[in-house]
Image (cartoon, helix red, strand yellow):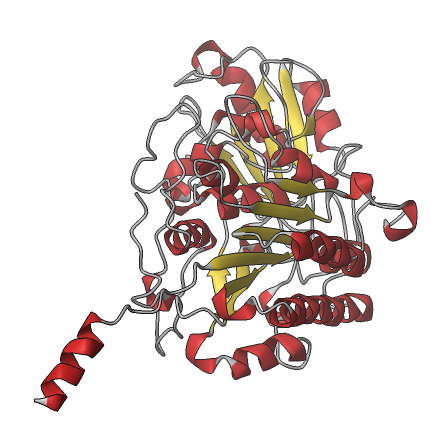
Amino acid sequence: MFRIVALVLMLLAPVPAIAATHVYIVVVDGLAPHLATRERMPELFAIMDEERARSSFFPKVRGVMPARTNPNHASLLTGAQPSAHGITGNAFWNRAMREPVAKLDAAELLEVESLFTVAEERPERITFAAFAKPKLARLFAGVPGRQRPPDTLWSPTWAPVTSRDQVTGYTRDGDTMAAALRSMARDEPDLAVVNLADVDRTAHGHGIDSPECAEAVTGADRTIGRLVEHLKGLGRWQRSVLFVISDHGFQREPVPGTVVELDRRLEAEVRGVRFAADGGVGHLYAERLAADAAELGPLAGAVQQAAEVARATPGVAEVLARLPGTTVPSLASAHADWRIGHQRVGELLLVAAPGYQFANAVEPALPGNHGRPEDLDVPLFVTGGSPAIVSAASGTEAPALVDVAPTVASLLGMRLPRRVDGGALEPGETGRRIDAILSSNGNQSPH
């Protein structure tokens, strides 16, 4: 009888509540897969070892084309492909404004809700972002009636001049993380995003396999260790999930030449076109084509002529057409998995040959660069003290970069991002939740 009563009392006793999950995303900008090793990142691998039951390492996760910073950050924080969110590179020609080629980093151009926007549906959620690159702070800023910014948004614009690189204006990793930790000490964020730029900056300046870049990787690793130490010191680690990921890789080949004359040649030889250099890719636009055009129509001749000029230019590996009307191979047919069929990508997408890059005054030639499909793979680490995650089983298929946002939404009990006009994303335009790393305590269906 005593055992029965004891059993009844145990069943009636309140079950301890599982602490709400808090998610931290650290983007080590430009971290190529071959750099994400135990030798170069000992602190992160040690953290993974300590949390072996809740840690997963995917050496190669597929990013989105082009392999540039802006489109991959947009996909990382919306869970959408570039064809949906509209950030098709770092540079573009704005058809509506008809101004010179410019950076593609304005928040009003992001056509899918970010995780920050969705999180604001519950005002008690706290969101935070610290971006070492000012352009990313612009991309995820608020737009009334369209996008909500993080509750706290930190940009190098507000950092002391001494903490910024004098050439790029990016803050150094230690200073970026220091600013993040100061802010997060006051309010524990439900979602925090930190972009670290030193690896990307040194790889651009010295090459991805340079000693300077190797040192930057180890520095980023120490910075991540500081974040984990901070969370443990405040008693937050046991409810935290940490994603560490890159946005793109880098060309490993030296860059012997640059396709710097192509925009001048095109504009000299073909009337009515604009060219945007974008590192490993280039975008060509027909000036008089409407943004919603489904075919080239009378402008097909000019686009065909531009394609022939591009094909004859050394360093151009591929010329691909977004719309029908020419003999140029179709972008959608040749590379259906790229999912980049948005008008901002241009009428022609040009891909540089190994060791080459597209450059001009907006996108200058650099000793190291990226953007080509060979630069798409990035490493992904998932760890934490939260019971919401488990280690992925051996042999688990690697997820994609666009799968991170749906997984974060599930961990935080949020719905998936939609188009900013309220429309749902079509199948193939969005990522999938990484179920392999979610425990029964974190496997919430976004609603």
Q: Nearer the viewer, residue 409 or 312?
A: 409
Q: Could you say where residue 230 lies in the image, as x and y percent from the top left?
A: 67, 67
Camera-side residue of 403 and 140: 140
Instruction: Report x, y in % for residue 45.
Output: 59, 78
- Write the residue at 73% across / 49% down: 132
1 w.r.t. 422: above or below: below
Between 205 and 108, the residue placed more toward the observer is 108
The answer to whether any part of residue 303 appears in the image is yes
Indicate the position of residue 111 as horizontal and vertical percent values: 48, 29
Q: In the displayed image of the protein, which residue is found farthest to the bottom?
A: 2
Q: Quadrant of residue 228?
A: bottom right
Q: Where is residue 43 drawn, in percent x and y?
A: 66, 77
Q: Could you tell me which residue is drawn at 13 percent across and 89 percent down?
A: 3
Tell me if I can see residue 340 in this picture: no
Q: Up-down: is 104 above or below 151?
A: above
Specify the quadrant of the image occupied by residue 122.
top left
As drawn, 140 above or below 405: above
Q: Quadrant of the C terminus?
A: top left
Quadrant for the N terminus in the image: bottom left
Locate residue 251: give its quadrant: bottom right
Q: Relative to the observer, which residue lies in front, 291 or 425?
A: 425
Judge left or right: residue 293 versus residue 46: left
Q: Is residue 37 left or right of residue 398?
A: right
